[in-house]
Image (spheres, rainbow, N blue to C red):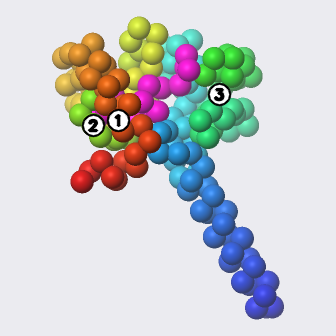
Amino acid sequence: MNPIKTILGTVAVSVALTSAAFAAGSEVNATSTGLALRGYDPVAYFNLGEPTPGDWQITATYEDATYRFISEEHKAKFEANPEAYAPQYGGYCAFGTAMGFKFDGDPEIWKIVDGELFLNLSSGVQARWEKDVPGFINTADVKWGEIEFKDPAELQN
């Protein structure tokens, strides 16, 4: 094999992987490829009342993250008002945010409060969060302003 082609191929793969890893900023909890909500449809929480995996062929981008939808109708609703459907705190755990951390939000551990979607790390964490939802949301709103653009690892120190 031609050594130049091998080097160019290696560089191309490295650039592609690096670009994918930084597809979404630290303000959005997304996979290394930039997929938000692990591919669940954000509109489905509101319209169907349950987490529903989206179709990989029906997507929209918001805050540099890719969201999937079960239908073009859901995609259109999201695109018309993404703030109404995107999870709070970039999809990070609501309880963790109140504590000043960015923990993974599980799209199957969720709650809609006052028309906003919140995720939590686990059902145990959500049970703690539910003991004072308004208080934790107020605290998380303040903390989010401090940590939104910080890398999750940076907050662990």
Residue drawn at 72 percent across, 70 percent down: 12
Residue type indicated by callout 1: Glu
**The N terminus sits in image quarter:** bottom right
Closer mark to the observer between disc 3 and disc 1:
1
Magenta segment's dominant SS is: helix
Asked if the stretch drawn in magenta spans residue 93, the answer is: yes
Question: Cβ–Cβ below 8 Å for labels 2 and 1?
Answer: yes
SS at mark 1?
helix
Q: Which residues are magenta?
A: 83-97
User: What's the residue at 38%, 31% (across, down)?
Assistant: 145
Mark drawn on residue 100 = 2
Where is residue 78? Give x, y as percent: 64, 21
**Residue matched to label 3:** 69
Query: Spatial distance from mark 2 to mark 3, Cα to Cα?
Result: 30 Å
Q: Which mark is residue 146?
A: 1
- In x, y percent, where is residue 146? 35, 35
Q: Tell me how far mark 3 sits from mark 1, CA to CA.
A: 31 Å
The image quarter in which residue 117 lies: top left
Q: Are marks 2 and 3 in contact (CB under 8 Å)?
A: no
Q: Which amino acid is tagged 3? A: Phe
Q: Earlier in the sequence, mark 2 or mark 1?
A: 2
Name the residue rendered at 61%, 55% in the picture. Answer: 20
Lower position in the chain sequence, tag 2 or tag 3? 3
